Amino acid sequence: MRLVADKLSSARGGRDLFAELSFAVSAGETLLLLGPNGAGKTTLIRTIAGFLAPRTGEVRLEGGPADHTLSEQCHYVGHLNAVKANLTVAENARFWSRFLGGARGRLEMALKTFGLSALRDIPAGYLSAGQKRRLGLARLLLAERPIWLLDEPATSLDSAAQQVMTGAVNAHLASGGLVIAATHAPLGFAKSRDLQLGTAAEPA
């Protein structure tokens, strides 16, 4: 399995973010998107996820199931955690499990992995920023997807939670998944290489 970007170009507000960008990421590999705010890291991840259309070029998955679109084979965790404050931790996870078509039994495993089991009946609105981030990341384990797209995944995480997140990512890579992550900080993901984006100043 290999994700290929071929001559991608994207613009926002009349300003080019990146142009003629090509790369490939194979199963078991991590691609880290580096660059200052406004360089296009978030735009690139959202384009791969299918939320944005490129101005030119294409993204395709080679070797994946033919009956699933690229978007259907991606997990996307963006800047926002997609957590409903009035739902409990378990209810939030249960919603995502159903939405993603997760297998039965994975919910408890996901909560346990990210240290949320003791908080399962607490409304998410009472969680700290780090706990909300862990809940957002927990949905990566609720359903199997070969491609994980992560936008600043370490945001709000303490060192212990970062180690848990890194362990989950590396286990995914070891099982044949691939990861593309935008980051300003080292992440410790296995088999990673960098892709440096431009030097624009506005948020992307």
Image (cartoon, helix red, strand yellow):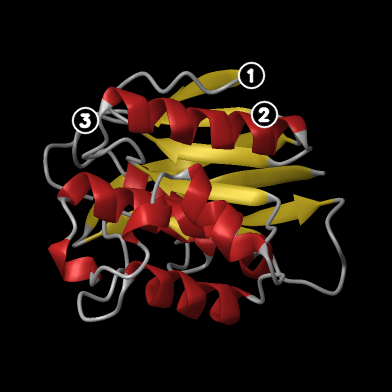
Query: Helix, strand or loop at disc 2?
Result: loop
Q: How far apart are marks 3 and 1 (CA)?
A: 23 Å
Q: Distance between the residues labelled 2 and 3?
A: 23 Å
Looking at the image, which is closer to me, 201 or 117? Answer: 117
The 10 Å Cα crowd at callout 2, few under 14, some 14 to 19, many 20 or more, is many
Q: What residue type is labelled 1?
A: Lys
Sequence order check, earlier mark of 2 and 1 = 2
> Which numbered dot is residue 36?
3
Name the spot of residue 39 as percent of width and height, x first.
27, 38
The 10 Å Cα crowd at callout 3, few under 14, some 14 to 19, many 20 or more, is some
Name the residue located 27 percent from the left edge and 36 percent from the top edge: 157
Which residue is labeled 1 in the image?
Answer: 191
Q: Nearer the viewer, mark 2 or mark 3?
A: 2
Q: What residue type is labelled 2?
A: Glu
Q: Which image quarter: residue 168?
A: top right
Q: Which amino acid does label 3 sit on?
A: Pro
Q: Nearer the viewer, mark 3 or mark 1?
A: 1
> Which numbered dot is residue 29?
2
Name the spot of residue 149 as percent of width and height, x first.
50, 49
User: Where 83 sits versus 41, above or below?
Assistant: below
User: Where 92 sits versus 136, above or below?
Assistant: below
User: Where 149 sits versus 23, above or below?
Assistant: below
Task: Give yes or no for contact between labels 2 and 1 (Cβ–Cβ under 8 Å).
Answer: yes
Sequence order check, earlier mark of 3 and 1 = 3
